[in-house]
């Protein structure tokens, strides 16, 4: 179980890096879009985050339920934003900034809560 948890943490971090890296790359372009890294990073981050929560519950680990709920809600919002806006050739810069800030907020909740 410990190996599975460590592997899921690694995948969760890689997914976060893809989401944040994809959004930071788009901040420099004149017409930003939701790229594949953002889309797959959002999905993978959500799935691995929920899987980590389930594993923590199965192992009777002490986790903050509030932090997990907030991270899950933010993850769902990020994934919905990425999925719904992937089809557009360009998205408003404000939406891209929102996605970037939400990704950073999700990481902040994970580290600071």
Image (spheres, rainbow, N blue to C red):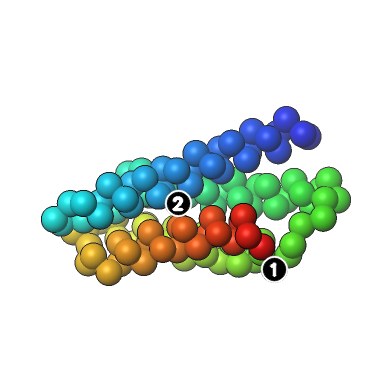
Residue 32 quadrant? bottom left
Q: Which residue is mark 2?
A: 42
Which residue ends up furthest to the left in the rendered image? 30
Identity of the residue drawn at 73% across and 51% down: 54
| Residue at screen point 48% across, 47% down | 16
Of tags 2 and 1, which is closer to the observer? Answer: 1
Name the residue at the right extreme. Answer: 60
At 33% across and 52% down in the image, what residue appears?
A: 23
Taking the image as drawn, is residue 89 in sight? no
Location of residue 69 with respect to 19 vertically, above or below: below
Query: Where 7 falls versus 35 (above or below)?
Result: above
Res 102 quadrant in image: bottom left
- Which quadrant of the figure contains the N terminus? top right
Q: Position of residue 38 (x, y in %)?
A: 37, 49
The image shows residue 61 at horizontal and vertical percentages of 82, 50
- Marks 2 and 1, how far apart in space? 20 Å
Q: x, y percentage for residue 59?
A: 83, 46
Say if 84 sits above or below 42 in the image.
Answer: below
Residue pictured at 56% horizontal, 38% vertical? 11
Instruction: Locate the C terminus and report the quarter of the image it occupies.
Output: bottom right
Q: Position of residue 19 (x, y in %)?
A: 41, 48
Depth check, front residue: 81 or 66: 66
Q: Residues within 10 Å of mark 2 (few under 14, many from 20)?
A: many
Q: Earlier in the sequence, mark 2 or mark 1?
A: 2
**What element does badge 1 sit on?**
helix
- Number of residues whose C-alpha sits closer than 10 Å to that of mark 1, classed few (under 14), some (14–19) or many (20 or more): few
Residue 69 visible, this angle: yes
Indicate which disc residue 12 carries.
none
Location of mark 1 (residue): 66
Question: Which of the 4 image quarters holds residue 72?
Answer: bottom right
Q: Is residue 1 above or below residue 77?
A: above
């Amino acid at each position: 179980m410990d190996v599975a948890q460590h592997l899921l943490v690694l995948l969760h971090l890689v997914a976060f890096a893809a989401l944040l890296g994809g959004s930071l790359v788009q901040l420099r372009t004149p017409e930003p879009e939701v790229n594949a890294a953002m889309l797959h990073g959002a999905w993978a981050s959500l799935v691995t985050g929920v899987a980590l929560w389930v594993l923590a519950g199965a192992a009777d680990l002490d986790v903050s339920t509030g932090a997990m709920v907030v991270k899950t809600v933010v993850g769902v919002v990020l994934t919905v934003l990425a999925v719904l806006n992937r089809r557009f050739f360009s998205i408003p810069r404000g939406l891209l900034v929102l996605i970037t800030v939400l990704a950073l907020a999700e990481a902040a909740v994970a580290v600071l809560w």
